[in-house]
Image (cartoon, rainbow, N blue to C red):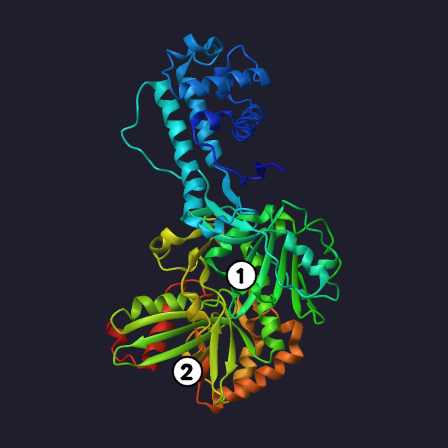
Amino acid sequence: MQRSTLSIIGNKAILNIRERMCETAEELLASDKFRLILDHCLNNLKSKNSPLLEFFGSCEADEECVNYLVKTLSLLVKYESSVVPHIFDKSRIFLKDLDKVASFVEYLYDYWRHFDRFIINDSEGDRLDKRPYRTFNETIEQLTHLIRTVYRHIQENITGSHPNVYRQVRAGAKMAVISLPKDIAYKGEKYKRLNSVPVIRQMLIYPPLVIQQPMNKRTGHFKKIQKNPVDLIELKSGEWICYPAKVGKLLIMVYFHLDFFELGFSMCNLFQLADDSDLEKKPDALFIYGAPGNVLDKLAEYSTVFYDDEENGIFVGAIPDRPEFGYFGYLKKMILTLHNSIVMKSGNMPFHGALVKIMLQGNKEATILMMGDTGAGKSETLEAFRVLGEKNIRELTIIADDMGSIELDSKGCPVGYGTEIGAFLRLDDLQPGYAFGHLDRSIIMNPSQVNARIVFPVTKFETVILGHRIDYILYANNYEEIDNEHPVIEKFTSAEWALDIFREGAVMSKGTTTSSGLVHSYFANIFGPPEYKIIHEKIAVKYFSSFFKNNVFVGQMRTRLGIPGYETSGPKEAATELLRIIGVTDIYSV
């Protein structure tokens, strides 16, 4: 068995480690991994007929000359450029013009760092997960230090000088994981073959991370189908890894292909990684992200599909391995679709919205659920709470940033639960400077494009699953202007009126999907309820009746986020009015 491998797939460099790392410059430069990067870089320069290759002189950049170059670089780690030709005569070819060879070394260093770089510590036969910090130190930290050291020594020996300012860039990997085989307690033989895929047990990331996704929008719906994707998909050894996600109270095993590694690993900022005790239980669902070929085509209008295996008590989601599905929203929303479907089948109500608990001065508190579609202003209103209520709010706790569920307690009162520990937010809709305040924990996606996103942790998993009695339920209306007939916050007087508004699910699209203009979706939640509409309708009628019976404030909040010019002021006014309703009397002086 190969002990370690380096693979380059698109803009990703994936280093699988099953042995100790290189410890010296000689080992590094003599490794087949370095040669792979060097050849890749040279081929890139050749394709552009780059003048950087002029330092090869009369020597063609063939295999023999590249061997000479590697030997020269190895000597430059220890010796000044004037000494190297006396040790290795062939180095004279490269060292005739020191400026050119220095420029090439700089380019090679930057070329390596332009990749999204990942380290997979394969723990099979060696329980590295029992000493994760030591493992990460001996892999990602050691590699970072070694690469930087080799680069700096070579450059200093070429130029005869050293920098006055050293910038400690991440020269190793951006993310590292420890994975190992696990016998997951699946019911049904067809699922047990998935146990050949290693399961992530620990992760290390170096935020802030900037990731370029192939796509920056999501399209289509997640459709329930009559065929089990597991029967159609073969997971090739060495190409897959599994992130065991705790999604609210559920365990969902997410299998993702190496083509989507940068997106799959980003889940660590959104969903809690399951621990060993969680993996002793049967999963509630599994998701295959990156199904090969066209096996999912023609199963539904869109190839983003899921299946309810009632016999084995598990849901199965699947999305194809094609660039158009290379967007984090597909990963996140399929997981939440599976969650919502399971919630409905258990008789409870899923919601698409933000759930937050606010503790005010004077021991007042309120738990607020803001339901609405993507771009309706839920997260933006939460941020306005933080800014407006700084002196009035003792604590603001996020329970759910995007999706969750409602259950009725023994007294029939609504209790809310979340699903995620993180948030996946549009950079354009955040308060100025807000994203910068979270850079030390963030993963930033497609920052130069429309619908640029940031992913970062916002709450604790214990908070997500604790269960919080809900006091206010508001529909986030981002498309209506405010006037005497349409106040910022409007209270509904009956369950029927409320159900009409929530059912309609109207929202002004913000460009987060391929939809545009004013669109409608059942309960502003296309992630499961449309596929179980009959079940959801019965649940909704029952639950909205209980809301009014238990004197929960049910209404709509006009954020105006979808109206040009109100991107900031709209959510701020909505938050101001809501704080006033809750009991903050001097909010307008804040």
Does residue 469 appear left or right of residue 283 in this picture?
A: left
Q: Are marks 1 and 2 in contact (CB under 8 Å)?
A: no
Inspect this view and state whether residue 514 appears.
no
- Work out which quarter of the rendered image holds the N terminus and state it: top right
Q: Residues within 10 Å of mark 1 (few under 14, many from 20)?
A: many
Disc nearest the viewer among 1 and 2:
1
Please state if 22 lies on the left or on the right of 431 as rendered. Answer: right
Percent from the top left, x then y, of residue 241?
Answer: 59, 50
Residue found at the far front of this picture: 125
Residue at far bottom of view: 549
The image shows residue 320 at horizontal and vertical percentages of 66, 53
Residue 282's x, y, as percent?
61, 67
Residue 183, x across and y down, in percent: 61, 58
Picture disc at residue 130:
none
Residue at 42% across / 69% down in the picture? 462
Q: Residue at x 51, y 61 (%)?
A: 276
Nearer to the camera, 350 or 137: 137
Whichever of labels 1 and 2 marks the residue nearer the N terminus, that label is: 1
For disc 2, the neighbor class at 10 Å (few under 14, some 14 to 19, many from 20) is many
Amino acid identity at mark 2: Asp
Q: Could you say whether the residue bearing mark 2 is in a helix, strand or loop?
A: loop
- Disc 1: which residue: 245
Vertically, is 303 above or below 342? above
Residue at the spot x=54%, y=18% of the render? 67
Foreground residue among 219 and 291: 291
Q: Is residue 584 visible?
A: yes
The relative height of residue 378 versus residue 437 in the rendered view (above or below) is: below
Disc 1 and disc 2: Cα gap in Å?
29 Å
Q: Which residue is mark 2?
A: 471
Q: Foreground: 382 or 189?
A: 189
Quarter of the picture holding the C terminus:
bottom left
Amino acid on which disc 1 is placed: Ala
